[in-house]
Image: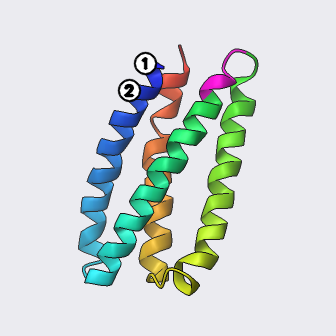
Amino acid sequence: MKKLGIYAIASAALIAGAGWLLTFAFPTASDRHALIVSAVMGYAVQLIAFAIARAWTVTNVVAGWGMGMLIRFIVLAIYAFLSSRVLGLPVAAALVSLAAFFFVSTLLEPVLLKS
């Protein structure tokens, strides 16, 4: 549980930093709304994926990490369809930001899954 807490705090900080950097590439109000929606979704999915990977560390850490990657891919694919049609978000800002948030917070996983 301690590792999950550390991951939650560190990934929130990384996602916030990446979101701030992405505001320079996507400056409009609708783009920023897409960044916020993507950040919240990305953070929630990352916590779930890390919890799954952490639970599998005892038996097979690679399988747990692969399951997390599969979850991220499926969420990104579903988000691609829903972001513009249902949520009315700018597609480029929504998808680029979600992929970026997944990427930066996934970089933390190997460090915290090691022990």
Along the line of sight, the residue nearer the viewer: 51 or 106: 51
Main SS of the magenta part reads loop
Q: Is residue 69 above or below residue 111?
A: below
Instruction: Give the SS element for disc 1.
Output: helix
Q: Which residue is mark 2?
A: 6
Q: Residue at x 63, y 60 (%)?
A: 75
The three-letter amino acid code for the residue at tag 1 is Lys
| Residue 103 seen in the current view | no
Instruction: Give the SS element for disc 2.
Output: helix
Q: Which residue is mark 1?
A: 2
Q: Residue at x 70, y 32 (%)?
A: 64
Give residue 100's quadrant in the image: bottom left
In magenta stretch: residue 56: yes
Classed neighbour count for the residue bearing mark 2: other residues with Cα under 10 Å, few (<14), some (14–19), many (≥20) = few
Q: Residue furthest front?
A: 86
Q: Residue at x 50, y 61 (%)?
A: 99
Along the line of sight, the residue nearer the viewer: 66 or 86: 86
Q: Are marks 2 and 1 in contact (CB under 8 Å)?
A: yes
Give residue 85's quadrant in the image: bottom right
Counting from the top left corner in percent of width and height, residue 9 is at 33, 35
Specify whether 22 is left or right of 93.
left
In magenta stretch: residue 29: no
Classed neighbour count for the residue bearing mark 1: other residues with Cα under 10 Å, few (<14), some (14–19), many (≥20) = few
Specify whether 27 is left or right of 33.
left
- Marks 2 and 1 sit apart, C-alpha to C-alpha, by 6 Å
Counting from the top left corner in percent of width and height, residue 94 is at 46, 73
Q: Which mark is residue 52?
A: none
The three-letter amino acid code for the residue at tag 2 is Ile
Q: Is residue 68 above or below residue 53?
A: below
The magenta region covers 54-58
| Residue 100 seen in the current view | yes
Q: Residue at x 67, y 50 (%)?
A: 71
